[in-house]
Image (cartoon, rainbow, N blue to C red):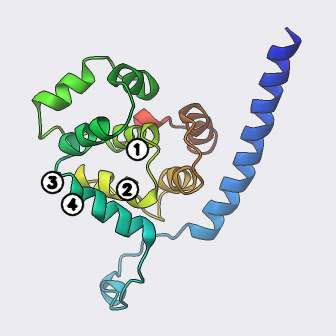
Amino acid sequence: MGLFNFKKRRIKKKREQLCKEIDIFIQVHFVRERNNHAKNKYNTLSLKSDPDRDACKEWYENHGNPKTFSEIVLAYLKTTDIDEGYLCDKCGFEKSFISKLKNDKTYHPSKGEAVLFAMAFKLNFEETKALLMSAEHALTNSSKEDLIIRYFIENKEYSISNLNYILEKICEKKIKEII
């Protein structure tokens, strides 16, 4: 009984610390979208080389440049030691979900579903952006939900239960409710 309470207190303390850090992260990065996008529409500065972006690009090239969400998830499944059943359990999906991806190459997940896969595969930020893009989603700086997800990915905090706790506390949503 004492060990259980100790673990419970430790989890609560970690979550309180995460809330504080994420609150600061949101304050620093939150940008409200404006109606006038014209003057900031194009960034003409060239991007510096980024090892994560370069590695992500190389991974895609080495795996036949998968385009659809289903193809990318199935390629990650082949290249990792993650079991399909474990992946579904971790993401909170029915066991038949992977079969759905195998049979429907055009499956279009919600943003929450795509993020769950990114976290289950422990993808870095560049890999997560690429996976989300394949599902026609993106993370923005004008959404608290997106900034919380970004914080978790950038800081390699892949606990879905902690993510749900923080999302519910700050945004009153869980990851599966994010469309």
Label 2, residues with CA under 10 Å away: few <14, some 14-19, many ≥20: many
Please tell me which residue is depicted at 36% across the width and 76% down the height of the picture: 35
From the viewer's perspective, tell me whether residue 48 is left or right of residue 102: right
Q: Does dot 1 land on a helix, a strand or a loop?
A: helix
Q: Nearer the viewer, residue 169 or 125?
A: 125
Which numbered disc covers residue 61?
A: 4
> Residue 33 at what x, y percent from top left?
43, 71
Q: Is residue 39 above or below residue 125?
A: below
**What residue is shown with label 1?**
118
Q: Which residue is mark 2?
A: 127
Say which label, 1 or 2, has the lower sequence index: 1
Three-letter amino acid code at disc 4?
A: Glu
The mark lying in front, picked from 3 and 2, is 3
Q: CA distance from mark 3 to mark 4?
A: 5 Å
Q: Position of residue 8 (x, y in %)?
A: 78, 23
Which residue is located at x 77 percent, y 32 percent? Answer: 12
The answer for how far apart the CA atoms under marks 3 and 1 are is 19 Å
**Of 74 and 171, the residue lying toward us:** 74
